Each structure stands twice: as structure tokens, then as C-alpha cells.
Amino acid sequence: MLSKRDTLLFWISAWWPVAVGVAVITVESTPAFGSDRTSQPLRWLVQLLFGQLSDQTWHLLHHLIRKTGHVLGYGALGLVWLRAWRMTFATPRTKTYPRGPRLPDARFLSQAGLALLGTALVASWDEWHQTFLPNRTGTPYDVLLDSCGAAAMIGMAWLYLRRFRHAQPAC
């Protein structure tokens, strides 16, 4: 008899968020999402909400908005990589920890490492790809920023799981 993990549906459910995340990054890596194309629509929205901005202030704010997008976008990608690896290497829950697996442990750390590696590889590919586009620039600093975003989100996931899923029985 096949276990749930042996079915195609299980593997699709584990890994489709990673595929969607990589697809979103790929679309955002096109010339349509270059700084020269996002500046005007974002400036219009920010000025609608907060009033007029000088050009100098806008250039700094636009840069910060874009870099925040890197941190949040790759942070989310790191989380879906982590989810996929945790589902792939999941072990049955035990009676000792009825609400989830124990954390931190070597298994979580290896899954987090794989998630961070996957995110860093996608970030590297994305930045390399951008070096070939006329209105984009690929830099190793963005790979580092993307990886830090993923590491921060994975760290927050670890804290969440440790706080809310690490239910030890009362003695």
C-alpha cells in the first residue's frame, strides 16, 4: 500500500509553491520590472498617499522600496523552499510532541540550509540573467541581500516553530 508521501499529489503539493516562487522571480527579472519602468507608477502611488516628493528624496525612496522588495520576495522564496524540504523529509509526529516536530534539531538545520542554498542559487541565476538585459544590472550585493532576506525569514520561521510548535508535555 502506498503511503501519502509516495503519491504524485504529495510531491506536487510540496514543491509547487517553489515553482511558483521561481516563476514570479523570473517574471520580475525582465526589462518590464527595471528601475526605469517602475519609478513612475510607484512615485505616483507614493505621492498619492503621502504628498509631493523632491526628485532627490524619490530616488532614495525608490531605491529603498526596490531593495525591500528583494528582502521580502526572496524571504518568501526561502520560506517556500523550507516548506518543501520539511515536507520532503518529514517524519511521523510522535506522542511526545503532538503538535509538531522538535526544534531546533539537526534535521531542521539541514532543511534550512537546503532552503537557503536553493534561494541563493535562484538569486545568483537572477542577477546573472539581469547582466544581459539593457535596463537591468546584476550585482553580487543583491545576491547577498536576497540571501539575507531568506535567512531572516527562515530564522523567523524557526522562532515561530520553536515558540508555537514545541509543545512538551507537562511533567
Image: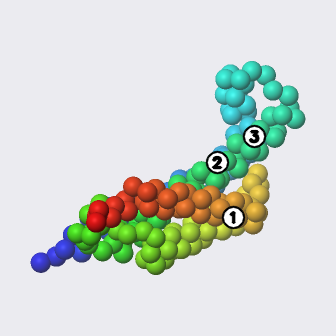
Quarter of the figure with residue 123: bottom right
Q: CA distance from mark 2 to mark 1?
A: 13 Å
Is residue 94 visible in this depiction of the protein? Answer: yes
Q: CA distance from mark 2 to mark 3?
A: 11 Å
Q: How many marks?
A: 3
Q: Residues within 10 Å of mark 3 (few under 14, many from 20)?
A: some
The quarter of the image holding the C terminus is bottom left
Residue at x 77% of width, y 38% of height:
61
Residue at x 76% of width, y 45% of height:
63
Q: Residues within 10 Å of mark 1 (few under 14, many from 20)?
A: many
Q: What SS does tag 1 mark? A: helix
Residue 26 appears at what percent x and percent y? 57, 57
Type of amino acid at the residue the image marks with label 3: His
Q: What residue does disc 1 label?
A: 143
Q: What residue does disc 3 label?
A: 62
Q: What SS does tag 3 mark? A: helix
Residue at x 77% of width, y 58% of height:
137
Tell me which label, 2 or 3, sits earlier in the chain: 3
Type of amino acid at the residue the image marks with label 2: Gly
- Horizontal side of 94 relative to 89 (left or right) equals left
Q: Is residue 147 above or below residue 5?
A: above
Q: What residue does disc 2 label?
A: 69
Looking at the picture, the colour scheme in use is rainbow
